[in-house]
């Protein structure tokens, strides 16, 4: 009750599908139809950063100087973007990644075809991590990875432990009317997931 929504910035795009927020309030967003990354400063000013084909998700280093962008275009994978120069270079080659996040050690977890893979931060080498079609990933402080899985008929929120084992934490995989109740009994179609600051 009493919550308010305000427009922070207007972008020249019809579909922004991913956002990364820095500690100073700077936002980086994927302008999917225009095949580019935009920067939105804390005052709401919008500037283009770099062209990236079909950008589905992105993650930044702490300073905001480097972005890693997952592209769902065939044969593209993950790009590394230098924010200052706008230089875009291939980084890793997972299949049609719809999600990416960075672990505390610098490595990445990425949606890879119909599974989740780990990407080495130094070499860009891709190795299988979990055999589950989870996307829009987020790495928790304990190193576990959360993601969403679903289709138009419903979905789930999943937790992937460091050994690759998968546990459902919310959702039945089907749809149902919205109601309060146990997380494992709710019918939902999640499109993203986030953690509270403490990792809850």
Image: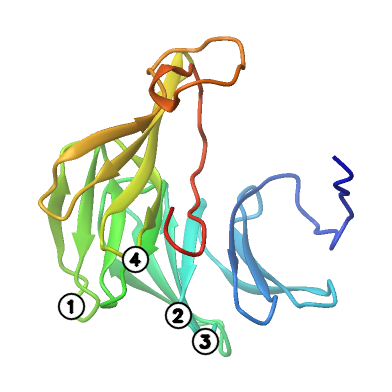
**Marks 3, 2: nearer the viewer:** 2
Q: Nearer the viewer, residue 14 or 152?
A: 152
Mark 2, other Cα within 10 Å: few <14 / some 14–19 / many ≥20: few
* Of pointers 3 and 1, the one earlier in the residue sequence: 3
From this view, report whether residue 151 is shown above or below residue 89. Answer: above
> Which residue does the numbered mark 2 point to in the structure image?
61
Label pair 1/2, CB-CB below 8 angstroms: no
Q: Position of residue 200 (x, y in %)?
A: 44, 53
Mark 1 to mark 4 CA distance (whole Å): 23 Å
In space, the residues marked 1 and 2 are separated at their CA atoms by 16 Å
How much space separates mark 3 and mark 2, taking CA atoms? Answer: 7 Å
Which residue in the protein does label 3 denote? 65
User: What is the crowding at mark 1: few (fewer than 14 residues within 10 Å), some, or many (at least 20)?
Assistant: few
Q: Nearer the viewer, mark 1 or mark 4?
A: 4
The secondary structure type at the circle numbered 2 is: loop
Q: Position of residue 5 (x, y in %)?
A: 86, 49
Earlier in the chain: of badge 1 and badge 2, it is 2
Q: Say what secondary structure mark 1 lies in.
A: loop
State left or right for residue 21 relative to residue 200.
right
In this view, 3 is above or below 31: above
Q: Nearer the viewer, mark 2 or mark 4?
A: 4
Q: Pointer 4: what residue? A: 141
């Amino acid at each position: 009750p009493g919550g308010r929504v305000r427009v922070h910035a207007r972008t020249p795009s019809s579909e922004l599908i991913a956002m990364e927020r820095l500690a100073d309030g700077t936002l980086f967003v994927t302008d999917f139809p225009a095949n580019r990354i935009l920067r939105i400063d804390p005052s709401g000013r919008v500037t283009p950063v770099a062209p990236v084909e079909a950008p589905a998700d992105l993650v930044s280093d702490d300073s905001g100087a480097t972005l890693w962008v997952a592209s769902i275009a065939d044969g593209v994978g993950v790009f590394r973007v230098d924010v200052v120069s706008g230089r875009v270079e291939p980084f890793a080659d997972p299949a049609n990644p719809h999600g990416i996040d960075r672990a505390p050690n610098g490595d990445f977890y990425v949606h890879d075809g119909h599974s989740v893979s780990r990407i080495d931060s130094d070499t860009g080498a891709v190795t299988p991590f979990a055999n589950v079609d989870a996307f829009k990933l987020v790495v928790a402080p304990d190193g576990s990875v959360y993601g969403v899985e679903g289709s138009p008929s419903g979905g789930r929120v999943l937790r992937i432990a460091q050994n690759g084992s998968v546990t459902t934490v919310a959702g039945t995989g089907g749809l149902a009317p919205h109601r309060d109740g146990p997380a494992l009994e709710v019918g939902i179609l999640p499109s993203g997931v986030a953690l509270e600051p403490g990792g809850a």
